[in-house]
Amino acid sequence: MSLPSESGATSWVDTANQSGNGFPLLWLPYCAFTPVSASGPASWPDLAAPMAEEPNPGLVPHLGVGIGAFILDLHKLQTSGLLSDLPAKLQSACRSIHLNGLMGCGPSAWSALRERLFDLLMWSGPDCTHDQAQQRLVAALLTPMAQAIFHKPVWTENYTDFYASLHHARNVGRLFRPDEPLLPNYRWLPIGYHGRASSLIVSGTPVRRPHGQCKAGSESAPVFQPSTRLDYELEVAAYVGVGNPLGSRIPIEQAAKCLFGLSLLNDWSARDIQSWEYQPLGPFLGKSFATSVSPWVIPMDALAPYRTRLTPRPASEPAPLAYLAEPDSNLSGLDITVETYLSTAQMRERRIPAQRLSQANLRDLYWSFAQMLTHQTSNGYNLKIGDILASGTISGEQPGSQGCLLEMTKGGEVPLCLPTGEQRTFLEDGDEVSLRGYSEREGLPMVSMGECRGRVLSATE
Ligand code: CA
């Protein structure tokens, strides 16, 4: 549900009304953050910083809401009494360090909080003295985004990685099975595997190059060494907001309502480890060493104006089985552009901006998040609040839309050329990958999913 006439409303936070800011009044995404004092550490850890699951584990995060160039502190908003008309359980959830408590309050509470935040941040005109007093109270609870350290916004127990982009599946399939790039099951069910939730890290946390067993095709035995074919995968994560008891299923008609929001996700992948270990049981250590998530969770309510139909399947392809048939296919997809950028150590030294490697759109997925969720519970599996369903690598049909290096470089055969003259087939130490997401629908302000960033650290001895 979206709020009435919100697309035309403006905020008294000036930066929210600036075109291109990406965090307008109708967006209001959530995060978990700690403020940095003017003399404090940089917002993001540098290469020399010690590895840590969270960039600054000594501070207790507060939940926040993005508006313009600022974060509104939800915790302080509640303790200031500005949420006192909301249910006690919802107010208590606003003082948590993760969004799980808010998710547990249910969809009507998600909308109620969003509506209250909208009212607090909306510009009502110059003559409303009551609102001006309230505005001063709220303004005191804003922290500039540039002065925040972000933390994982959600406590996630289970993480599933799907394979919902047919273009990605076909491009990768061509590398290994030129005669049959897509296996017969692809068009019938959302393919996925269970990932590891404990190695989920927030954007900005560096990623250590993993060791593993790697075997060149020409060799008779593998060697244990640092991966030489390290890759990223451009994905979007959907957070489960309503789970289901073990043994029950979530029907497709209810699936969309069980999703709380979306974030960007980078499924770091060691292709040499993966290609040796994956048969016959699928991804394992080539994937589990790190998965990055962006700090912002975009509520599904905020995404409502950006809904669209998934790109239609050709008439020759099978319709989904009844349990996967969307009740309204006009709303099954999202018009969100997603991009990958790469910056090498040399590029940063020479102040050359990060280079865009790919651009694709979420509406080109073959399977919707609702279909993924319903399929995941179709055997009675119990999804839990905070679980992640990731889209899988998002690629398009055209050149320049491939969401990982494996696809772009055709398995490491065709190197990328960078502005420094450097070449890449896979990631080198010091390379920084940044994922971005945004939408620029006509008649609506530009909205941003923020950034999911990670820099590659050299392997340990
Ligand atoms: Ca993946």
Image (cartoon, helix red, strand yellow):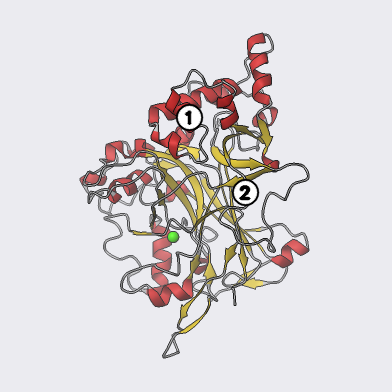
Label 2, on which residue? 58
Distance (Cα) linking label 1 and label 2: 22 Å
Label 1, on which residue? 92
At x 45%, y 42%, the residue is 334
Q: Is residue 360 above or below residue 302?
A: below
Figure quadrant, ligand 1: bottom left
Q: Is residue 214 above or below residue 285?
A: below
Question: Contact, CB < 8 Å: mark 1 with mark 2?
Answer: no
Hey, what amino acid is under mark 2?
A: Gly
Residue 5 image offset from top left, x and y in percent: 51, 21
Residue 457 or residue 302, whichever sits in front: 457
Quadrant containing the N terminus is top left
Residue 189 image offset from top left, x and y in percent: 28, 55
Quadrant containing the C terminus is bottom right
Residue behind label 2 places its C-beta within 8 angstroms of ligand 1: no
Residue at disc 2, secondary structure: loop
Q: How many marks?
A: 2
Hey, what amino acid is under mark 1?
A: Ser
At x 50%, y 39%, the residue is 298
Residue 395 image offset from top left, x and y in percent: 47, 57
